[in-house]
Structures are given as structure tokens and as C-alpha cells.
Image (cartoon, rainbow, N blue to C red):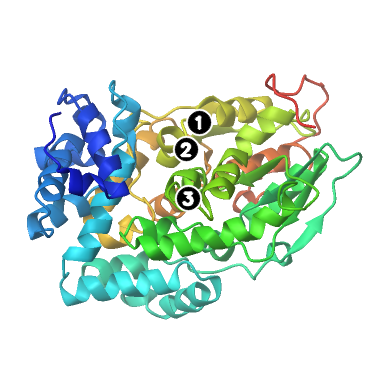
């Protein structure tokens, strides 16, 4: 794509990056076939190609964002399916992030929209505030179906009950069982530690059972993705910086014992942390540390495949339909490890049609665009239901919450199932399932060619 930025415009690092991205686009339109909003709405401006034209025009001409531009950029899920499809390597994710930042700086949203975004940015990334808000939302549950639009969506998606805060989510070092094979730190996160404490607990059990020492670092928290995708770049950088500052002292370069990995069990967060190097590319004080942190970051399934999953101790055999979160399959390009590990653990894996399409969660998209999000959720669940699953597995808390609002089939994190199969407790959402018998056969662990010191 031909661009017409001036030298003065290209002096800005974000504009320079966007110009390089735009030049890679060849207008082929392959992205439209896999874009959830284009598939659903059929509007060219709700496709990556259409949004790219809008962004190019806005940035080249240094125009404030218009209502039209905001409408179509806001409808983008940042699912990054287009990046998987694109034959030219267009990094649409970085381009749309720049557009959102420009919108945040140049467009004054209507009062209610502005207020909702402000509330979400001040509540969801902070566990104590988020917990308090969800407890309050429970009081409005009986009225949810009578409430309009976004307010009704927020009340409906709020869980009916919350687990107590987990002692495992506090700063500590949890020793490996047996000889130590590796030392890692984790991201305990924000929303996940409120909505489903079992995910972090099962992840830590799974790791320590496999000889991994787990450091829960003081000061780590929200990855920054939520505010980043609302265009609040400064807040996102602040949250990312806190995580880097929390993890860096654990690395050898930071004066600590060293880390073999930073293990993330929420794929949306993993996508963001792996991008810290890019986020701080022009910050001399943070650039090297941010890049090193990104290089250490892996999803829990990547790490378990690397070190090898122990043979299952129970015969599971349940039919599990695996929902691959967009941030997993598109954002991080992780496809085989979760499925391979679940099969090795004894589960029968089923694949839904249109697996590449988003479920409509996308951070807080389901709260900001509830109508589109609900249509995508229902389409996703219809495809899942056709596989006749006993369990739905996924690796992202956002997807779990979104899908759970539309189905009675239990939705369980991949780490919970792997933990259960290798000696951990049965996931709470499977409490009605009969206890499986002990596993008699011993199989080889699932492992790739990379060893962990």
C-alpha cells in the first residue's frame, strides 16, 4: 500500500511503525474471510481491510478521529485472526492499537460511553475493587433482563458466586516436589484471581508436581491489556512496567537466582506480556529488560510440553471440545500444545467448526459491544454443541466467562484438566462427574526437543 506520510510525521515512533505496517498491505482481502465482525455484519468497514483504510486516512492527514472511524474501530475485537490469515505479514494488532490511542487522544466520546470506559479501567485491573463491584452486581441479577444494553450485559455476565481469595495468590516461593528441574514465576493477574482462583492453584500444583519451583513475585498484577485495548497507552505502560519491575529481580541479570520462564495461564495476558519488548522499544531505561521479559514468557501449555507431562494417574476418557482462544491461536500462534497435552492426559479431543472465529469475549468487548458479542458467543456455542462435549476446555478466563453465560456444559481451564489427570483434585465444575478409576498403563510424557535446566 502506498503511503504519504511526511518526514516530520515519521519522526514519531508509533507513526513510523504504522507506516511500515501499512506498506505491507496489498489489499488482497484474505482477511475478510476470517474476520468475525465482517462475517457477522458484512460491512467492508468492519473488516481489517476497511479499518486499515480508515486508519491510514486518519493518521496520514493527522485528523481527529470521527464518529464513523470510532464506530468501526470500536467494533474490532483485536482477535488477530486476520494476522493468521494475512499472506503479507501485516501486523494489524500494532496498527489498531495505534489507532485506538489516537482515538483516545482526539475524540470526545458521549458521556455514558466515556463513563463506562473510565469505570472499567479503574475497577477490573484491581482485584479488590473488581471483587467489590461483582458482589454489588449480584444484587442486580434479578433485574438483569429488564436492564438495557451495556448495563444489562454487565449484570448478566457477572457470576452468581465468587470464590474466596486464594492464599496461593500472595507473594511467596512454592518449592518443587522432588528434585528441582526449573524455576519460574507466574502472572497472578487481576480478573482471573477474582473470578476463578482454581486456575492459578491448579497451575501451581501442576508445575510443582513436575519439579518446578514457582515464584509468586511481589508487585505483579494486571498485564495492561484491558486499558491498552481501550487506547489508554500510558496506563497500560504503567501496569506493564510494574510487572517488569516485579519479575526482573528474580532473573540472573537482575541479581536473582534466575528464571527458566515466566509462565502465563491466561492467553490474553500472555499475548500482551510477549509484546512488552515492542511496547518499550523506544524507552532506553526499560527496553532491554522488557525484551528479556517477553523472551522468557510462555503459556502454561508451551512450558508443560517443553518439560514433559507426566503419565496420567486416572482414566479420564471424557469428551472434551477444545476452544482455542483467539489470543492463543492468533495472538501467540499456539495451536498443537494444548490439544496434544489433553490427549496425552487421556481426554478425547473434539474440534468445533469455525474454530478460528472469536467467541466475543475479547477483554471487555462483551461489555462495550454486547449485541455483537452475544451473537458471536451464540454462534460459537452452536458449533461447540454439535460436537456433543462433556466438557469444554480453553486457556483464557475471558472466554470461560463469556461462554459460561450461554451454556450449562462445564467449562474448565486446560491447566485444571492436566492437574486433575496427573494427581490433582477434580475441578469444581466437574463435581457431578463420577470419579474415574486409577490409570493402569504408563505412557511416555509429551515433550518437545527443548530441555529445561
Tell me if mark 2 has few (under 14), some (14-19) or many (20+) residues whose alpha carbon lies within 10 angstroms of its own: many
Q: Is residue 425 visible in the rendered structure shown here?
A: no
How far apart, in angstroms, are the residues tagged by discs 2 and 3?
Answer: 13 Å
Q: How many marks?
A: 3
Give the mark nearer the N terminus: 1 vs 2.
Answer: 2
Q: Where's the C terminus, which quadrant? A: top right
State the residue position of label 2: 328
Label 3 sits on a secondary structure element that is helix
> Which numbered dot is residue 334?
1
In this rendered view, identify the residue nearer to me: 354 or 301. Answer: 301
Q: Where's residue 232, x and y in %? A: 34, 63
Inter-mark Cα distance, 3 to 1: 18 Å
Residue 200 horizontal/vertical position (percent)? 65, 54
Whole-number angstrom distance, CA of label 1 to CA of label 2? 5 Å
Dot 2 or dot 3: first in sequence order is: 2
- Mark identifier at residue 130: none
Give left or right: position of 87 versus 452.
left
* Residue 260 visible here: yes
| 2 and 3 marks in contact (CB < 8 Å) | no
Q: Nearer the viewer, residue 305 or 441?
A: 305
Q: List the residue tagged with mark 3.
A: 400
334 to 178, vertically: above or below: above
Amino acid at each position: 500500500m502506498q503511503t504519504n506520510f511526511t518526514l516530520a510525521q515519521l519522526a514519531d515512533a508509533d507513526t513510523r511503525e504504522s507506516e511500515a505496517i501499512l506498506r505491507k498491505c496489498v489489499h488482497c482481502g484474505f482477511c475478510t474471510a476470517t474476520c468475525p465482525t465482517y462475517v457477522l455484519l458484512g460491512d467492508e468497514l468492519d473488516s481489517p481491510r476497511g479499518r486499515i483504510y480508515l486508519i491510514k486516512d486518519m493518521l496520514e492527514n493527522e485528523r481527529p478521529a470521527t464518529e464513523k472511524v470510532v464506530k468501526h474501530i470500536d467494533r474490532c475485537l483485536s482477535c488477530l485472526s486476520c494476522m493468521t490469515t494475512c499472506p503479507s505479514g501485516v501486523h494489524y494488532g500494532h496498527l489498531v492499537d495505534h489507532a485506538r490511542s489516537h482515538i483516545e487522544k482526539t475524540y470526545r466520546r458521549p458521556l455514558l460511553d466515556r463513563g463506562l470506559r473510565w469505570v472499567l479501567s479503574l475497577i477490573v485491573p484491581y482485584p479488590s475493587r473488581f471483587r467489590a463491584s461483582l458482589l454489588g452486581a449480584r444484587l442486580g441479577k434479578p433485574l438483569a433482563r429488564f436492564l438495557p444494553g451495556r448495563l444489562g450485559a454487565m449484570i448478566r455476565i457477572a457470576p452468581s458466586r465468587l470464590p474466596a481469595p486464594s492464599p496461593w495468590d500472595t507473594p511467596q516461593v512454592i518449592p518443587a516436589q522432588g528434585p528441582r528441574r526449573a524455576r519460574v514465576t507466574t502472572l497472578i493477574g487481576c480478573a482471573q484471581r477474582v473470578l476463578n482462583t482454581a486456575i492459578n492453584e491448579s497451575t501451581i500444583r501442576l508445575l510443582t508436581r513436575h519439579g518446578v519451583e514457582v515464584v509468586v513475585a511481589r508487585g505483579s498484577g494486571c498485564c495492561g491489556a484491558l486499558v491498552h485495548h481501550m487506547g489508554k497507552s500510558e496506563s497500560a505502560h504503567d501496569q506493564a512496567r510494574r510487572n517488569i519491575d516485579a519479575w526482573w529481580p528474580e532473573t540472573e541479570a537482575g541479581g536473582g537466582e534466575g528464571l527458566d520462564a515466566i509462565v502465563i495461564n491466561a492467553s490474553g495476558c500472555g499475548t500482551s506480556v510477549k509484546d512488552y519488548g515492542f511496547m518499550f522499544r523506544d524507552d532506553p531505561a526499560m527496553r532491554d529488560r522488557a525484551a528479556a521479559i517477553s523472551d522468557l514468557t510462555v503459556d502454561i501449555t508451551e512450558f508443560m510440553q517443553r518439560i514433559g507431562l507426566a503419565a496420567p494417574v486416572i482414566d479420564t476418557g471424557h469428551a472434551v471440545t477444545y476452544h482455542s482462544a483467539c489470543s492463543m491461536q492468533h495472538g501467540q500462534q499456539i495451536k498443537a500444545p494444548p490439544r496434544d497435552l489433553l490427549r496425552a492426559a487421556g481426554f478425547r479431543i473434539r474440534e468445533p467448526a469455525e474454530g478460528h472465529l472469536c467467541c466475543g469475549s475479547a477483554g471487555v468487548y462483551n461489555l462495550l459491544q454486547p449485541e455483537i458479542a452475544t451473537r458471536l458467543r451464540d454462534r460459537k456455542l452452536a458449533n461447540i454443541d454439535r460436537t456433543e462435549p462433556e466438557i469444554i476446555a480453553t486457556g483464557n478466563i475471558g472466554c470461560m466467562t463469556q461462554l459460561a453465560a450461554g451454556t450449562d456444559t462445564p467449562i474448565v481451564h486446560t491447566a485444571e484438566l492436566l492437574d486433575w489427570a496427573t494427581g490433582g483434585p477434580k475441578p469444581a465444575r466437574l463435581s457431578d462427574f463420577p470419579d474415574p478409576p486409577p490409570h493402569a498403563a504408563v505412557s511416555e510424557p509429551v515433550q518437545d526437543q527443548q530441555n529445561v535446566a
